[in-house]
Amino acid sequence: MNDLNQHRESSLDRELRTETAVKSFMANVFTYMTGALAITGVFAFWFASSENLMSYLYNRETGATALGWIVTIAPLIFVFAMSMSFNRLSSFALLLLFIAFSSIMGISFSFIFLAYTASSITTTFFITAGTFGAMALVGYTTSTDLTKFGGILMMALIGLIIAMVVNWFVGSGTLDYVISCIGVLIFTGLTAYDVQKLKRIGIGEEYGAEGMNKLAIMGALSLYLDFINLFLFLLRLFGDRR
């Protein structure tokens, strides 16, 4: 009887430690993500509110400047750099890259203030935050395995990217609307999938403190991209253009 009680207590202790580890890991992920979004918002508003700074990025007669194109493309390079250098970089170096990425994303995001009204940007942000929060909760609490669901969404994302490239040349308003609707659905679903995936990663105590911190940063990057893309597609649907 004593052995049985000790076994139960040991199992309960393991479950509690695992639950604590997962909550701590997810808290780190969302802290990094929230910080990155805050940095992006500050830089976007800073540049958008300064005609002098915007003049370095955009010319009313010729469009985006060389620097404007650089800050538009640079975030993609940062994502590849963080992914490819994950094993070689320390968690501190990875965090510095994430901060730099968030800052440049903010500068590139200043362009949306040229195309949409500030009020519609604000409204869309809160809609995005509510949608993201609801799907993150679903991903964290659901007992359904979303692995296959995530695979389907990734294939759909590839198809969406191809459609966006095609529409870049075609310029169809109808196709643009369809792309925006599908984009919202894809990144809404990916939010739940990524949160569930990160929750499972949080159980992996074998990664060690340094490894878990690096995984938390990359997890924050993943959710950050889900949030940003969801926001952009919703803005294309509901934003009031200038």
Image (spheres, rainbow, N blue to C red):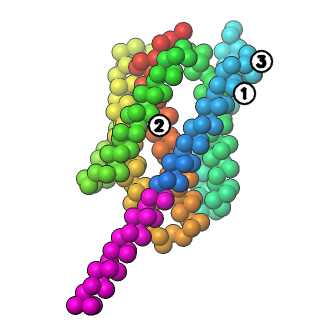
Mark 3 and mark 1: Cα distance apart in space: 14 Å
Check contact, mark 3 vs mark 2: CB within 8 A. no
Callout 2: helix, strand or loop? helix
- Going from N to C along the chain, the mark reached first, 3 or 2, is 3
- Residue identifier under label 2: 227
| Image position, residue 121 (x, y; %) | 51, 21
Q: Earlier in the sequence, mark 2 or mark 1?
A: 1
- Residue flagged by tag 2: what amino acid is it? Phe
Between the C-alphas of marks 2 and 1, the distance is 25 Å
Q: How many residues crowd around disc 3 within 10 Å: few (fewer than 14), some, or many (20 or more)?
A: few
Please give the residue where the numbered disc 1 appears in the rendered image: 67
**What numbered label is drawn on residue 52?**
3
Q: Residue at x 34, y 22 (%)?
A: 178
Ranked by sequence position, the earlier of labels 3 and 1 is: 3
Is there CB contact under 8 Å for labels 3 and 1?
Answer: no
Residue sticking out furthest to the left: 1
Position of residue 118 relative to residue 39, above or below, is above
Which element is circle 1 on? helix
Q: Position of residue 137 (x, y in %)?
A: 36, 45
Mark 3: which amino acid?
Answer: Asn
Along the line of sight, the residue nearer the viewer: 239 or 34: 34
Q: Which residues are magenta?
A: 1-25
Q: Is residue 63 above or below residue 106?
A: above
